[in-house]
Image: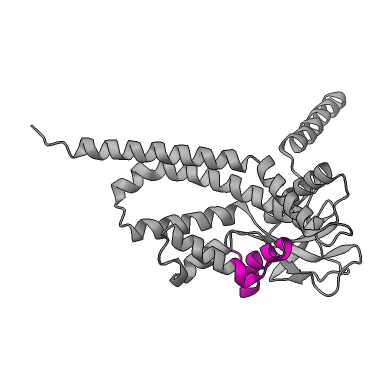
Amino acid sequence: MKRTNQSRDFILSSLTILLLVTTGCRQVERVTQQRDLPLRAWNRDLYDSEGIQVYATNSRAAREIAETAENAAKAFRRKTGEEPRQILFIAVDGDDPLDDELLKAGIQGLARISGKQVPDLEEVMIEEARRKGTKGIETDEALLKSMLGMIPGILECPPSRPATLWKDAVVVPTTKRIDDGFDTIIEFVMEREEINFIQRILMSPIIAIAKGYLHKILGAVQEAVIMGVHAQGREGWPQERIDQLLKDALEDSGLKQLGEDIADRTKSSTNDGEETTEENNVPQQ
């Protein structure tokens, strides 16, 4: 009986280890003893996930962002041959509080790693929205918050921090935050275009595909922003080298091909929709 129990325990232990390895489940724990960093900041608790420190409202969000951070660090080492620096992260989950500081982190982050001024970037974004015919976004507060909450950003670290920690912290939205933001945008568009219930059902497969594309796009942007912070302020690194690193990172992620794929699928969906409309308009005999 003892040997049987030992064998059973060995099998269970082996399966547990195998499950952890295959699912990529990393360790994460909430920090409870005071360190160089405050235990709470940005209305979030400090978590440690195998050496990566994340401010988050729950362990799931901390784990997800730590995995994103580790993947970006590996990509930076692979592309540059240099060691990534230690960076602090802030997770933005689905129902997390978002104050003005966090909402502005995205545009400020783009400004820091691109070397451009915030007003210039804001003007470009407004012009792009107008060019695409997007109306009403600038007056809908909930929609604006949802959109800004989906963008990775950069904020200054707390004044008390370890000497090895870089001065800038990276704000990264979780998958749930992106999903919630996307749903808010879709609902806004459908209400504005007066899409009825039947039309919404017919559009649901296209919306699901679009959400998948959005995750890929924002995943590539998250990695590029984190790599930009790893590159920022390095001796002998001109802005042109950082710009090229970001460009290469986005291209390597397949973003260009993804854009072409989206365009092809959109065109196909539009043609199918037009054909369906024509069939529905055929007079009944």
Is residue 45 on the magenta stretch? no
Quarter of the figure that contains the N terminus = top right
Decide whether the magenta segment is chiefly helix, strand or loop.
Answer: helix
- Look at the picture and state if 232 lies above or below 283: below
User: Residue sitting at 73 percent across and 61 percent down?
Assistant: 113
Is residue 109 on the magenta stretch? yes
Relative horizontal placement of residue 203, taking residue 219 as reference (left or right): left
Q: At which x and y percent is residue 84?
A: 85, 52
Quarter of the figure that contains the C terminus = top left
Name the image quarter holding residue 109. Answer: bottom right
Frontmost residue, 201 versus 262: 262
Give the magenta-colored segment's residue range: 95-121
Q: Can residue 97 be seen at all in this image of the molecule?
A: no
User: Residue sitting at 25 percent across and 40 percent down?
Assistant: 277
Relative horizontal placement of residue 267, taking residue 247 as reference (left or right): left
User: Residue sitting at 44 percent across and 57 percent down?
Assistant: 132
Q: Can residue 280 be seen at all in this image of the molecule?
A: yes
Residue extending furthest left? 285
Q: At which x and y percent is residue 50?
A: 83, 51
Q: How is the image coloured?
A: one colour
- Look at the picture and state if 208 lies above or below 136: above
Question: Number of callouts in the render?
Answer: 0
Q: At which x and y percent is residue 197?
A: 30, 50
Name the image quarter holding residue 110. Answer: bottom right
Q: At which x and y percent is residue 225?
A: 71, 56
